[in-house]
Amino acid sequence: ITCEAHDQFAAASQFITHMTGRVLGQLGVKTTPMDTKGFESLLTLVNNTKKNSMDLFVALYQHNPAAQQQLEQLEQALKEVKASLVQGREAGSPGRWHET
């Protein structure tokens, strides 16, 4: 495996996992009476990433150029998903459950 491939794989798995766990932890997600299996998996992710030091997370970012690209792609993906969500609501999409 090349160094570049290693960095890409690490960014796509380790960094994105730590980033997701840290972001959800920052949001303060907690168990609810309506937890799904998927949400329970996210809570496990938050708890697992909390067990790792911030130094590890920072090192994953600072020492891997692919992690920096991954973060930019994550930011762009969030913007695109948000835009689709907002457009769907404004268009009165059939998936809309609640009036705002």
Image (cartoon, rainbow, N blue to C red):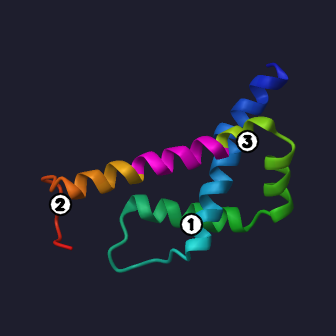
Q: Earlier in the sequence, mark 1 or mark 2?
A: 1
Amino acid type at circle 3 is Ala
Which mark is drawn over residue 67? Answer: 3
- Residue 77 as seen in the image, left or right of residue 63: left
- Spatial separation of the CA atoms under disc 3 and disc 2: 35 Å
Among the two numbered marks 1 and 3 on one chain, the one whose residue lies closer to the N terminus: 1
Q: Position of residue 98 (x, y in %)?
A: 17, 70
Whether the residues at callouts 3 and 2 have beta carbons within 8 Å, the answer is no
Please, what is the three-letter code of the amino acid marked with disc 1?
Answer: Leu
Image location of residue 52, percent across then percent down:
77, 62
Q: 53 left or right of 91?
A: right
Depicted 9 relative to depicted 95: above or below? above
Label 3 sits on a secondary structure element that is: helix
Q: Nearer the viewer, mark 1 or mark 2?
A: 2
Secondary structure at numbered mark 1:
helix
Please name whichever residue, 82 or 54, is drawn nearer the observer in this view of the structure. Answer: 82
- In space, the residues marked 1 and 3 are separated at their CA atoms by 18 Å
Residue position for label 2: 96
Assign the N terminus to one quadrant of the image: top right
Residue with the mark numbered 1? 24
What segment carries the magenta color? 71-81
| Percent of width and height locating residue 86 | 31, 56
Residue 58: x and y, percent?
A: 82, 56
- Which mark is first along the chain, 2 or 3? 3
In this rendering, which labeled residue sits more in front, label 1 or label 3? 3
Q: Residue at x 17, y 60 (%)?
A: 96
- Tags 1 and 3 touching, CB below 8 Å: no
Give yes or no for residue 88 being in the magenta stretch: no
Residue drawn at (49%, 51%) of the image: 78
> Residue, x 54% and y 44% (percent of image)?
76
Q: Residue furthest left?
A: 94
